[in-house]
Image: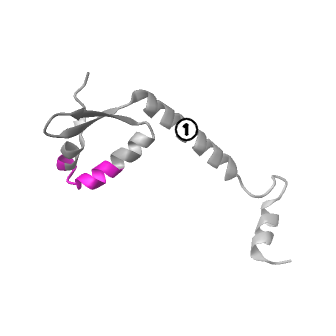
């Protein structure tokens, strides 16, 4: 098994505060993109984060579906039988 990455290591490498890194990690964990393993020793508790390939696939599929739905909603608001002249007339307020 891979060693994973600690939140403090990510904070040091990115130059971002540990709180901000944890907030982002929690969002990724909620989306099942990453998983977290807690290791407890007598001195401290450490969390190691791992990428979750199945969660990443699921996330990408869901986003593709949402984009396709949005694309369908953004269709041109006029029926195809309207001519360019009729469309301009509607927008210009003439007639």
Q: Is residue 79 left or right of residue 75?
A: right
Q: Is residue 82 above or below residue 45?
A: below
| In the foreground, 27 or 39 | 39
Q: Residue at x 59, y 44 (%)?
A: 66
Q: Image quarter for residue 37?
A: top left
Counting from the top left corner in percent of width and height, residue 15 is at 20, 53
Give the residue at mark 1. 62
Quarter holding the N terminus is top left
Q: Secondary structure at mark 1?
A: helix
Counting from the top left corner in percent of width and height, residue 49 is at 29, 36
Counting from the top left corner in percent of width and height, residue 67 is at 58, 45
Q: Residue furthest top?
A: 1
Q: Is residue 12 left or right of residue 34?
A: left
Instruction: Please state the total of marks drawn on the protein image.
Output: 1
Quarter holding the C terminus is bottom right
Q: Secondary structure of the magenta portion, mostly?
A: helix
Q: Residue at x 60, y 39 (%)?
A: 65
Q: Residue furthest front?
A: 42
Counting from the top left corner in percent of width and height, residue 31 is at 45, 40
Q: Residue at x 68, y 47 (%)?
A: 72
Q: Residue at x 53, y 41 (%)?
A: 63
Q: Residue furthest left?
A: 43
Q: Image quarter for residue 5?
A: top left
Q: Is residue 22 left or right of residue 94?
A: left
Q: Is residue 26 above or below residue 3?
A: below
Is residue 61 inside the magenta stretch? no
Is residue 15 inside the magenta stretch? yes
| Residue range highlighted in magenta | 12-23
Q: Residue furthest bottom?
A: 94
Q: Is residue 17 left or right of residue 71?
A: left
């Amino acid at each position: 098994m891979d060693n994973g990455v600690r939140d403090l290591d990510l904070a040091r490498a990115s130059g971002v505060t540990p709180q901000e890194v944890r907030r982002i990690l929690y969002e990724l964990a909620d989306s099942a993109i990453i998983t977290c393993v807690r290791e407890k020793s007598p001195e401290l508790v450490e969390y190691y984060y791992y990428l979750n390939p199945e969660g990443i696939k699921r996330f990408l599929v869901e986003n593709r579906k949402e984009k396709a739905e949005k694309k369908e909603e953004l269709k041109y608001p006029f029926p195809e039988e309207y001519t360019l002249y009729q469309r301009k007339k509607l927008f210009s307020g003439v007639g």
